[in-house]
Image (cartoon, helix red, strand yellow):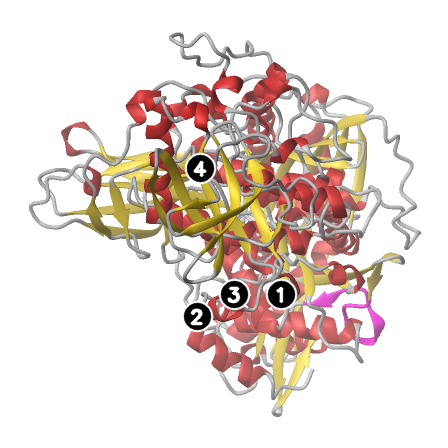
Amino acid sequence: MSESAPRPRLPHDESSSESLVSDLGLSSSDSCVPDLPPDPPTCEVGSSDSQVDSLDLNSPSLQEPGDGPGSGIPTRIGEYRVKNLIGSGGMGQVYLAEHIRMQRQVALKVLRSDRMSDDASVERFYDEVRAASRVLHPNVVTAFDAGEFEGIHFLVMEYVDGVTLTRLVAKNGPLSPGMAASIIRQAALGLLHAHRAGIVHRDVKPGNIIQAKDGTIKVLDLGLAQISNVLWSDDGRELGRIQDPDSRHKRKGKLIGTLSYMSPEQLESPDDADPRSDIYALGAVLFFLLTGRPPFQGEYLDQVYGHRHGEIPDLMQFRGDVDWGMANILRRMMAKRLSERYASLDEVIDDLRPYVEDAQAPTWLSEYVSRQAPVDVSTMSGGSTAITNLPLVGIDLGMTYAAVAESISGVGIRNMPAGEDGQPLFRMAIATDEGHLQFDTAANQMRLTRPRQVAHCLPMYIGKDFVQREVGGRKCPPEVLLAIAIRKVVANAWPDRPIPKLAAIAVPSSYDQFHRRSIKQAARIAGIDSMRLVDRSVAAVQSLLLENDSASLDDHDAVDLADSDTVLFLGLTGQASEVALIRRESMQLTQLATDGHWHTGMLAWQQRLVELAASGFRSAYRFDPSKSSLVASRLQVSCERALKSLLLLPQVTITIDRDGQPLSIVVCREEWLERCHDLIQGLQRSMQLVCKLANVRPTQIDECVTLGPLLGIPAVRHKLLKHLRRNLHVRQVDRSEVARGAAACLTAELPQRSDMLTPPRCVSSQTIGIVVEGTGGRRKILPIIPRGTILPARTNRKLTIARNRDSMTLSVVESSGVRGDNWHSLGRYEFEVDKGSSNQLKRTRLIGFELNVDGLLSVRAQTPGTPESKRLPIIPASLLQAEGEAEWIRWMSNLTF
C-alpha cells in the first residue's frame, strides 16, 4: 500500500464505554525503562500480568499480602503459602508463594478482587489457564496448577528468577547482535512450541519475555492468547482436537495486544491473528534489543501508521556491527504482507542459528542445538564481530580471465596478482603436461600443440556431468575445474596464506539458478566457507565509487555524494551480454532492471569471426580448418589474437599453421560486424527492455559504464548509444575494477567494515513461476516472483489438491531463452493426501518461495493451520551430489597449486 494511504481507524468494541486501555489494563513492564521516553497511555492496548519486570526479592516494590493492590488475599491459598506481591496488572496480581509440602517457590497469579464477579474476566482468566496447560517447554513459563479457593481464582506458575527484556535493555543498553540473536531464537523455540499446541500469543513484547539467571529465555503471559482446538506434533501431524476450547466469541472484534509490537493484520482484524502475527512482534522485539526502542514511535496513530504503512527499519543504519544477513532476517520477520513474511518460526530459528553466540545460550540448550540440521554457511552470516578482522576477497570469475582483489578492515581494497609471475589477470585454462598441472598462459599455449589436454573457458562447461578433457588424470565435473581455478588464483595472490574464508564472486546478472548454484558449489569445493554472488553490473558501478589510485575506502572518486543519477551498464564479456539500469543515491546502489543472456557473450562474437575466417580459408586455399581439431584450435587462438587488433584496426591478418606451412587471410572489421548485426540488435532490445521495466526514458540516463573490449569499438558504441543524450559520460571498467567492486559490495554488507558504503540492492534477473492447470485442462505458467523484484524476495501461495485426486505435482519453472520468452523446468514436488480424505484443510498447502540475496531459490511447504513449514529439496538439483563433492575435495587436497 502506498505511503499516502489514509491512516486507519482501529477496531473498537462499541458496546463498551470504557477505553481499551482501562478494560485490558496497562503493562507495568513496558513503562519502566529509565532511558526511554514512556509510551503515552493510548499506545498501550494490552495487559501484562506477567510475574514482574525484575524478580529481585530484595526489591522495595515487594509487598506483603494485604498491602496495597490486592488487599484481602489470604496468606494461604490451597496448598500454597502466599509471601510477597511481585507484580500487578489490569487483570490480576502475581505473588511469590511456596508450595507447603514440596517447599518449592512458585509464582501465584490471582484474579483481582474487583474482577472476580465479572463473568467475562473470569472466563478470560481461565482462557489463560487453558492456554498455559497446553504448553510445556523450557522457553515458556510452566503452569503447575490452577483452581478456585474461597472464591479466589488462581494460576500457579513456575517462578523465574531473572529480568524481563525491558529491564535488561534499560540496565545494559542495546545488546550485541549475538546476544540478541540468542534471546530471540530461544523465544522463537518457545513460541513455536506454543503454536504447535494451537496457541497464538498475540502479545509478544520485551515485557513478556524474561531472561533467567542461567541465560534461559522464558515467554510469559498467555493471558491474551488465541487458542485453537487443534494439537500438532513436532513433524506437523495433527494429534487431536479439543472440544469447546475457549470463549473467543465473547471478545470478538476487541483490539488486544501491545501497540508498539503489534502486527499490521492484528491492527486490521484482531480475530485473524495467527502465528505469523507473533513472528512480526518477535521481529519488533529483536529491533528493540538492538536499538533500545520499538521500531515505530510517536503518538497512537503514528505507531499504527508505522506498523501498517511505514518502511521497515534498516538495522544497518542503526548498528555498525550488524551485517546485511541479520538486517534481512528482520525485514522478513516484519514484512507488512503476510505473503512476504516468514510463514513459520522454524524458519526464523534456522536463519538465526549462525548469529547466536554460544556463550549467551544456557547449558541445557547445547545438546538441543547439536542435534539441529547443519546450517548453510555458504552465505554471509555470523553473530560475532570477529569477522571484521578477517580479510575478504572479491573475484571476477570470467569465461576467459579472472581477477582478484582484497579488502582488509582499516586498510582498504586493493587488487592482487591473479596470474602467474605477478600478472593482474589469470587465464582460465588448465592443462596436464607430463603429469603436472599447468595453468594460465602456459596452459593456454598448449592449445596450439595439444588442445585435447587443455580445458579452457571453464564456465562454458556448466551443465555437463564431466568435462571430457582430463585434468590431473581424471575427467572432472566443471564445478571441480572452477574450484581448481579459484584455488590457483588465491595461491597466486597469497602464496603463503590459506584460502580466505569470506569471498564475493562477480557473475553475470543474467545467470540462471543452475549457473548460480554451480558457482556457489565451486567456491565451496575450493574451501571458501562463506561467499556472496554479486551481479557483475553492480560490482562494476560500485568500483567507480572508489578512488582507483587509492587503497583506502575513505577515498573515493570525484562523486558528489549529494547527487543521485541513473547509470546504464553495458557488459559484453566471454560469459554473457548484460544490460542493467542502476540508480545511485549517494553511495547506495539499487539495481532497477536487468536483461541479457549467458549464451550471447563475447564468445558468440568470436565465433562469428572464426566462421568468417574459416570461410576465407576455404575460398583462398580450398581448405576447411574445422576438419582437424588441431588446426581448428589454432584458428581459434589466432582469431582471439586478431580480435584484439580489430578493436583498433579496420582489418587484420589471420595466420594458421597447416603441416608446417603458414596460411594467411585478411579479415575486414566491417564485414565481421555485419555478421554480428543480430547480436548488436539483441543488445539494443535489452536496452529498450530495461528502460521499459524501470520506467526510465533513454534521455534520462546520466552515465554509461561499459565492460568488455568490444564495447570500445566506435561503430558498436555508436549504434548502442545513439538514442541517449549527446553529452553522456561513458566510463569503461576492466576486470580488476570489477573484482574491487565485488570486494566493496561484500565489505558494505559486513559490520564495522565501512563508514561510507552501503550494501547494493539487486533485483531478480529471471521470473520464477509454477505450472498450473487452467480451464479445459490446458497448462499455463503462473508467475510467482517476477523478474525485477528486489532481493531478497519472498511470497507464499496457497495451493489446493483437487477433490478427485490423491496427490498434486508442483512444477517450478524459470524464464529462459535469449529473449526471455521461454521457460525451463527447475524441478517438481509431489504432495499427497490420505486417500478418500474430505478434510479440505489437509488438501491445502501453503508454499513459500524465496529468492535470497544471491538470487538462489528455496521452497518451503506448510499445511495451513499447522505451525511448521518444511524445507523442500533444492531445485534444480546439483549434478554433483554431496557425497561426490566430498570425494573431489579429498582429491584436490593432493594437487599442487
How many numbered marks are there? 4
Question: In terms of sequence position, does the residue under pointer 1 or pointer 4 come before the other?
Answer: 4
Q: Secondary structure at mark 4?
A: strand
Q: Is residue 820 visible?
A: no
Separation of disc 4 and disc 3 at Cα? 32 Å
Considering only vertical position in the picture, is 468 above or below 113?
below
Horizontal relation, residue 876 to residue 503: left or right? left
Nearest-to-viewer mark from 1 and 4 = 4
Nearest-to-viewer mark from 4 and 2 = 4
Check disc 4 and give the amino acid type: Val
Pointer 4 and pointer 2: residues touching (CB < 8 Å)?
Answer: no
Considering only vertical position in the picture, is 716 above or below 267?
below
What label does residue 358 carry, if any? 1
What label does residue 110 carry, if any? 4
Quarter of image, res 566: top right
Q: Position of residue 780 (x, y in %)?
A: 27, 34
Check disc 3 and give the amino acid type: Leu
Separation of disc 1 and disc 2 at Cα? 33 Å
Question: In this figure, which residue is indicated by the disc labeled 2?
Answer: 880
